[in-house]
Amino acid sequence: MFLFHTIKALRDYLYHQRQAGKSVGFVPTMGALHTGHLSLILASKAANDLTICSIFVNPIQFNNPDDLSRYPRTLTADCTLLEGAGCDAVFAPSADEMYPDTPALKFNFGDLERVMEGQFRPGHFNGVAIVVSKLFNMVQPDRTYFGQKDLQQVAVVRRMMLDLGFQIELCPQPTLRETDGLAMSSRNRNLTDEERPVAAHIFKVLTLAKEAILAGQSPAEARQLAYAHFAQEPAFRLEYFEIVNAHSLQTVETTQLHNQTALCVAAYLGKVRLIDNFVF
Ligand code: AMP
């Protein structure tokens, strides 16, 4: 497996691979890799000749400096996992390599970012869109793999690709979970031993809300139920629990329930911010 730190080295490698007619799958990550990330690598390997993974903790998508400084960085262990999964090359640039100057460009995704993550993390999706569009230009993949765990990110990237005309196939992948239902996440490493079992409460509440809807309750009732269950677990500070259309991200009423309805949650457990969702 190759490890590149510069755009030039990555481009030289990819140029020769493309000359040889190889198709390229691309998995952007921020590292501290777990089995969920590796499932994206495996999905890419199944459909492409070459799989490239980027590892870059993108400073401009963090609105909270503590979150950025606490974000785990484990490049050596990540490379071992990627090599084991059969990844062909890793691109791990420095912040200076990615941002020789502060980007002047600003993305505005309108309604897509006025809710949920966009509402609670102002500027987050501008940072995501800048880094993802830069990475797309550097890698020029045929296909790209994103986790449905970051449902709003998938919707924003889909919109960015449409608006900018990227000729890349977006391949969203299901969320991998721990045995107690907790969605795998790099941030789980920052949970204390006491917090870790409590974190599975998020999955339990999502399950209860989903069952309530399937039993005929309205989205508003299911949302209320979720808020009540979070109130019973004081270790959590709930930011939002929303029931939305997975593409438009706008709130769903009873008459609009269908198989693209998503239950989305974000909550702090101690200092760790966790997000999760179920899509019907
Ligand atoms: P991150 O390193 O957190 O930016 O994540 C990199 C990619 O992995 C994103 O597309 C995430 O949605 C995806 N991802 C993160 N957690 C999981 C998971 N538990 N299952 C599947 N994909 C995931």
Image (spheres, rainbow, N blue to C red):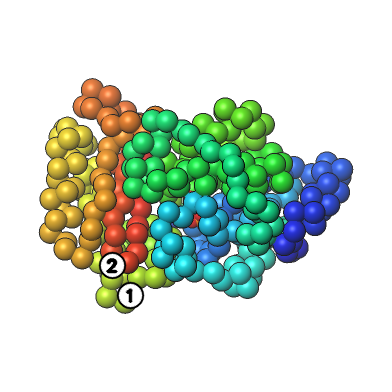
Label 2 – label 1 distance at C-alpha: 9 Å
Cβ at disc 2 under 8 Å from ligand 1? no
Residue 10 on image: x %, y %: 77, 54
Residue at x-position 27% and y-position 30%: 252
Element on which disc 1 rests? loop
Residue at x-position 58% and y-position 39%: 105
Q: Nearer the viewer, residue 70 or 4?
A: 70
Q: In front: mark 2 or mark 1? A: 2
Q: Quadrant of the C terminus?
A: top left
Q: Nearer the viewer, residue 15 or 34?
A: 15
Residue at x-position 65% and y-position 51%: 101
- Report the residue marked by disc 2: 270
- Seen in the image, is 52 located left or right of residue 194? right
Contact between marks 2 and 1 (CB within 8 A): the answer is: yes
Q: Tell me which numbered mark, 2 or 1, is placed earlier along the sequence.
A: 1
Q: Nearer the viewer, residue 27 or 95?
A: 95
- Seen in the image, is 37 located left or right of residue 90? left
Question: In the rendered view, would you say 37 is above or below 171?
Answer: below
Name the amino acid, label 2.
Gly
Residue 209 on image: x %, y %: 21, 44
Is residue 48 visible from the viewing direction of this image? no
- Report the residue marked by disc 1: 192
Question: In the rendered view, would you say 261 is above or below 41?
Answer: above
- Residue 117: mark in rendering: none
